[in-house]
Image: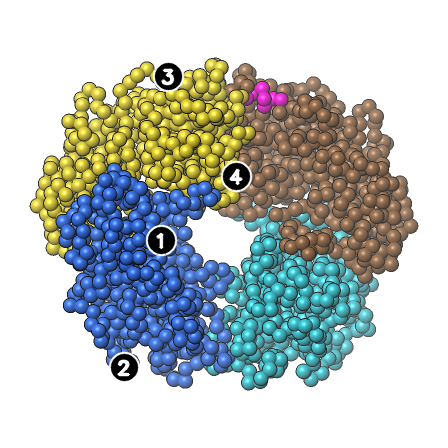
Chain colours: A cyan, B brown, C blue, D yellow
Amino acid sequence: MLTTHPFDDDKLREECGIFGVSNGEGAAALVALGLHALQHRGQEAAGITSWDGHQFHTHRAMGHVAGNFDRDDVIRSLSGTTACGHVRYSTTGETAIRNVQPLYAELASGGFAVAHNGNISNAMRLRRDLVRRGAIFQSTSDTEVILHLVATSQYRTLIDRFIDALKQVEGAYSLIVMTPEGMIACRDPLGIRPLVMGKLGDAVIFASETVALDVVGADYVRDVEPGELVIVKGNGELSSHKPFAPQAARPCIFEYVYFSRPDSISDNRSVYSVRKAIGAQLAIESPVEADLVVPVPDSGVPAAIGYAQQSGIPFELGIIRSHYVGRTFIQPGDKVRHLGVKLKHNANRDLIAGKRIVLIDDSIVRGTTSLKIVQMMHEAGAKEVHMRIASPPTRHSCFYGVDTPERAKLLAAKMDVGGMTDFIHADSLAFVSIDGLYKALGEAKRADIHPKYCDACFTGDYPTMLTDQDELAPPPDQLALLAEKVG
Amino acid sequence: MLTTHPFDDDKLREECGIFGVSNGEGAAALVALGLHALQHRGQEAAGITSWDGHQFHTHRAMGHVAGNFDRDDVIRSLSGTTACGHVRYSTTGETAIRNVQPLYAELASGGFAVAHNGNISNAMRLRRDLVRRGAIFQSTSDTEVILHLVATSQYRTLIDRFIDALKQVEGAYSLIVMTPEGMIACRDPLGIRPLVMGKLGDAVIFASETVALDVVGADYVRDVEPGELVIVKGNGELSSHKPFAPQAARPCIFEYVYFSRPDSISDNRSVYSVRKAIGAQLAIESPVEADLVVPVPDSGVPAAIGYAQQSGIPFELGIIRSHYVGRTFIQPGDKVRHLGVKLKHNANRDLIAGKRIVLIDDSIVRGTTSLKIVQMMHEAGAKEVHMRIASPPTRHSCFYGVDTPERAKLLAAKMDVGGMTDFIHADSLAFVSIDGLYKALGEAKRADIHPKYCDACFTGDYPTMLTDQDELAPPPDQLALLAEKVG
Amino acid sequence: MLTTHPFDDDKLREECGIFGVSNGEGAAALVALGLHALQHRGQEAAGITSWDGHQFHTHRAMGHVAGNFDRDDVIRSLSGTTACGHVRYSTTGETAIRNVQPLYAELASGGFAVAHNGNISNAMRLRRDLVRRGAIFQSTSDTEVILHLVATSQYRTLIDRFIDALKQVEGAYSLIVMTPEGMIACRDPLGIRPLVMGKLGDAVIFASETVALDVVGADYVRDVEPGELVIVKGNGELSSHKPFAPQAARPCIFEYVYFSRPDSISDNRSVYSVRKAIGAQLAIESPVEADLVVPVPDSGVPAAIGYAQQSGIPFELGIIRSHYVGRTFIQPGDKVRHLGVKLKHNANRDLIAGKRIVLIDDSIVRGTTSLKIVQMMHEAGAKEVHMRIASPPTRHSCFYGVDTPERAKLLAAKMDVGGMTDFIHADSLAFVSIDGLYKALGEAKRADIHPKYCDACFTGDYPTMLTDQDELAPPPDQLALLAEKVG
Amino acid sequence: MLTTHPFDDDKLREECGIFGVSNGEGAAALVALGLHALQHRGQEAAGITSWDGHQFHTHRAMGHVAGNFDRDDVIRSLSGTTACGHVRYSTTGETAIRNVQPLYAELASGGFAVAHNGNISNAMRLRRDLVRRGAIFQSTSDTEVILHLVATSQYRTLIDRFIDALKQVEGAYSLIVMTPEGMIACRDPLGIRPLVMGKLGDAVIFASETVALDVVGADYVRDVEPGELVIVKGNGELSSHKPFAPQAARPCIFEYVYFSRPDSISDNRSVYSVRKAIGAQLAIESPVEADLVVPVPDSGVPAAIGYAQQSGIPFELGIIRSHYVGRTFIQPGDKVRHLGVKLKHNANRDLIAGKRIVLIDDSIVRGTTSLKIVQMMHEAGAKEVHMRIASPPTRHSCFYGVDTPERAKLLAAKMDVGGMTDFIHADSLAFVSIDGLYKALGEAKRADIHPKYCDACFTGDYPTMLTDQDELAPPPDQLALLAEKVG
């Protein structure tokens, strides 16, 4: 099993990436490439659905895009010039494959396929109502309620039925939908999860991030706007619809901190530059006398470069990441269990010994990894270890399509920065401030009334209703786990 | 299939890594960890042999250490306190598994297992002689001649038979041998391939690189010396033997350039520091006015940091490596074949556009990747692209256990630096000089008479006889391919 | 791939077997055994669903019961004292596993699982109506309409909803249904497909054939009657319901001819004895002077024994069946393609040479195999070959859960007995008469008005409406293939 | 895992079958077919080696011929007009595949492949000597000593070296050897294991049984004679050599009793007819008043027909064998463990109830199966059960290539017929006499001095030296197991 990030147990995980091609030759092959470029957004399962003008074809598989969707027979079976795909985290077992997207249903109007990034926060209540009216669900995915809402809507045209469905759901959704009439891409009214539009010759492309456009050689056109439906017909005709009441957008700020690839451009900002700016901001807010700036590879690198350039302290690879972290080595036998962390990272001893180190990471979730990394620096002979984190403390669960541990396990929900410093055995620890984070994004500070981003994981300020959470009587954070299962 | 380096077709490849544990509890589990840390030295097959005081146990598998040797049942089956293992490149098919090491034979004196890093350059001639005398070979590996030379030696003790065998072979060999009487580690008289010795409690450890000692928590003791046999008996008794006539050593210089991990220490030198020093030397020898120093990730990073620090030009991640390069994505359909390089690397456009770039890589083999990377920089809007290479031009094949393309395919064997500059479409191209390389290693310059390293790939100055090559009449370089097959 | 019968391409194939256990310890293990005993009724896929008092567990797999359902982990995962299972023929690909039964749905009343033997002959029309009303189907199986009819029924209790559903379906169905309240076994009003009830301690067992009761050590209690619902509650309480207007039953006569195992007892008749009686009847109706009675193994053996005993001509194994027929040997290369038949059957030359042979088989479908077998006898030196068939000519397709070739491929639909004799190159050919078949079953003859069995494959006299067939305008037989796909 | 016979644990097992084609187009495909027809002689592994005039190609696999050697890619890879193959029983694990034949070695004279049916009874001593002289073995197979004896022989021509090797080995061997010069087929001087020669166009075929000739459409020419070497050169030239001192032959009598297929002809006798004759002889020697003659399927059928015809008691299928016995159903959970026997066989109750049964089986080894079958008859209501066995009591182990349990487990080695009758709970039990067995083979009786067959399993009269057995001090039978492992 490959994993994106070296200490993945100790990171938040984006749950999905989506990619669609309308009116492009070899559409499924392009989707496979696009999904491969989005693999960091979901690594446990992938699926592609194509439409050849007569019928839909779907292939879904547990595991990575490479190895499953780079086989000629698979791509050939996904014929047609329109296709969309999905990468996701997922549970195991027989039911697992049923939850792999795109989900598909034969409606009276013909086939209907949907790929979803996000999480519908009233899915449990909607599902209960639908089952009472005779609906039979094929998956445990929150996304399937959309299929049934469309299937049972009283409106006449497919578009009206789809809008009718969307008006009943709460939460975060970037969707790519395929029907015999064309492809629909849309984002929830707050635009919590990203979705961009590109062009490759005559083909229209939709993707979670611009890096996927780069990989297929497409040009970035613009973001799909919050609350917008973009419809591409079979003849290439493109139209935009905004059926929702206007609302200030709240895109996820954590995409800049960690989820998106550094080479993606989001809302006209280079993710790499934002991360460097956060690092520089950290150097301004929390300077320290030191000999070396050392990133926790790979996600801490851009912020570390920013910190080093701002502070003038040299940037050095004090931790070497194995080329093989991807493949988890399950350590056999108890004797060697404690050696785990070194399999993935190893201290560059010669460099570290006797030095004062500024260690840069993007975030702290449980804190277990930070502890091990700091210890590794001490064991390698570091004189001082100063940890700097390129995001504010993560104190709240996410209900919008991100796999967060239950609140009780978030280190920052349990203790203050002083406690955390002791916990990880660092000589000092500092997080960038919430205003500093907004500064790195070009704002003066976080606006109290209409903050520009969804930053609920740092502030607890959730921009939507959380119906399913509220029905589960006890305080939402304790039951975060349950919500994730539906998501 | 995982691959170490993003453009692996265009790198030289070390062919083996070896690791042994004598008198250590859970020896096979330690060997598995050690081999995992050496995975960059050979990724197509792995094997472990253990000795439990009564019998030998062997498990061999195509593929990676992780996934094969982290299974409890496998490790349990490899019982005993002494074990050794091997990672290698290998061909496919039924015969493949027979070539996976450790090789093993039941001799009259009992079991005999051997793991070999290097290549025996008179293996074909020795094999022909042995078959004439009635020997039946079980593999196509050059290493097997050692087994038969020991089996048919006229000497009485096993050690004498083994030394008798070694005296008949030419070329490069670091060996770990297991017999019922104990473990033997040895290096050829020139010490071409590396081998270090460590200690973990009472256990003696041998490994190709120090990083593998780090990962199992062992302390580095010293290098096994060129021409030395270190014998560890079952009771822990350790002895050193030097049966060969003294000779000046010639360890492989390319271990510093590319093969070894940056966090390894070789002959008391940090590989990371050597690479930074080469980068700095490059900046001195071939300076250029530019805005950014950009490494070709990951192998160009240390030299790029050195170059940046020496020149004062900022170090930036202008190329983003996919977290998933490991798993080769086989692009289906011809339409998308040309998109290959972007799957692995993507330009950080926002950073590159309008800038003068110094691009740092460790070496150029065929040149195909350099060409693509330079093009990618131009397409991303770079104003100028200046390529700097942290090794001299690679002009000659290696016959000592490195997988080199035949000479006709080495770019530097076909054209001079001017031609190469044109070929890769760079604005300028420079290699570090051979003397500069020796400087980065602490020498004044390359000694004409007894150079301190084997640098035959740069200079053509081979330190041993090449019997099998010479028998294949035509000039050796044209037939390099054949030699590799034996190796 | 295992196949039941040596020349399976040339046999009709029963499409399903079902087995259920209510209130029995280790229910899933018993179901696995029972399905293994019913493997001849469906060999391409199998599934088991269990209920542990709290939740349902399902495991489904392509392939045989052995190899899939004899694994400890699988059986352990199917916990609970109530379970049912299904073996079937099925198509391949991703959709295949969705069609493997038991089908399962979460209704508002709780889980609902169903295993079905038979075919619903108005499934396509019902499905179309349900989709129009917003239902989303998860499979292409005719059985799924039952789930949706229950889910959307306006009745209140589950039993009433289930009966409501059954009253809307036409065709053949023996069903085992599991709900949190208990197990329901039922047969369509004509009782076309079989279903028996047994007892093992306190457990109630349902099975397609008595042989499955034998294998689990259960006692046969009685047949589930045509049009009857037997309900077994969780507390073991048993009740019988007959919601349909009374009708004369029409069980499938081909179960006696070929589908059922010879050691099964159907409607108090031993299948073996019926087959021997048909053989004896054949000897009376179509005697011939001959030296040996030779069965086409294995299905022709009982009739051959009957023929031999009646005629006094010795029974001999003139054709030897390979022990390995089960595993299809796919002959590589065109050179050897014609050798096919001998891989499965081989003439016992020494016995055949110079003899007059009576060859006994149970039926002729396409006739291709009969031709090859007769040729094999001639090549082995037979003086005369007289073919005798233990059923009337098969002239019509079945729409009740049997895989028949389209009518145009049935030899007896294309030519008379004289033509068939020439086609297979036999010296003579005779079929048992339809009245003779009824005689072997204890009747005086076939009743013109209310024949006791469904014999539509011989007579074309279908006992139910064939709605889906009628909607497909052209004469039903030409489109038989389509109907099978739904079935 | 498929198994030949329903109660295989309780049968002797032939260990190998061999098949070779010289100068035939599509040789490997023919060998695959031939091996498939010989699958009953060895079911755990198979291998084929071909020679294309330039090089040898080998494919070996655990498992059946079907599924492994019916793949186009495999057959295509085995190019050439000369090929031989082998089916065998084998142990599991990594070493297993090394023991799968044909074994192959590169000798100084070129490639040398050998397929062996039988067992060399001085293999352990020869191996010890060869290892002392420096030979390295690649397998644990007794057959490999032949390779090393040829490799180290002092003779000059390959044929002389091969004869030199054969003169040093004891025991049973039918061999097919391939060299660049041609194919050699030979049998040991006593002709213990069978080997026949056939013709298919210009191709010469060798096979363990004639049934394999039938399946490929070849004509039987003659048996390879005991002590004969038949050499077929690449140009088709055929020659016969008899390098051994003449000796009376002793072919294995158990081939007639059980090993060979009933449709094979051995030494001009139909195996089926011999088995019927043994059944008739049993009826003469041990008559009984009864209602039905019932075979234990399938191996008891021919003898049961013979018994029925001789006695006039009707032959009936009182036991039905599942079509799926081939695939072992591993019963999950202890609850159902005792149901085992019924999975494979089931009583035809309706027929058995109230009847006196004569039950016919070919042999009794451990007796466990006989006990279960007799019990099954009683449980089905049989009034009396009389067991008749178509061979004498099996009292001694075989050292000639048959997998026999150690002597202590042979029922007939532990008790007399009276004791055995009680053990299996039969009303009576009788074995055919040793003289009766010879009578069924056309002899007057067993000759005291030079009996015509090897019947050591019945009489203990071993026709060769048993060197390895004698060296293992304690009485040979106790150590039979060890010998088998080498075999």
The residues tagged by marks 2 and 1 sit, at their Cα atoms, a distance apart of: 44 Å
Distance in Å between CA atoms under marks 3 and 2: 88 Å
Q: Does the magenta stretch include residue B126?
A: yes
Q: Where is residue A236 in the image (x, y as percent from the top left)?
A: 69, 72
Residue labelled with disc 2: C245
Observer-nearest of B236 and B190:
B190
Say yes or no: labels 3 and 1 on the same chain.
no
Q: Pointer 3: what residue? A: D243
Circle 2 packing at 10 Å, graded few (<14), some (14-19), many (20+), is few
- Identify the image quadrant of the C terminus of chain A: bottom right
Instruction: Please name the residue that numbered disc 4 is placed on.
Output: D77
Callouts 3 and 4 on one subunit:
yes
Q: Residues within 10 Å of mark 4 (few under 14, many from 20)?
A: few
Q: In which quarter of the image is residue C52?
A: bottom left
Label 3's element?
A: loop
**Main SS category, magenta section:** helix
Q: Is residue D451 above or below residue A468?
A: above
Horizontal and vertical percent for residue B3? 65, 46
Magenta range: B125-131
In this orientation, which residue lies closer to the viewer: B214 or C113? Answer: C113
Q: In the image as oriented, which residue stretches furthest toward the left?
A: D289
Q: Do the residues labelled 3 and 2 touch (CB within 8 Å)?
A: no
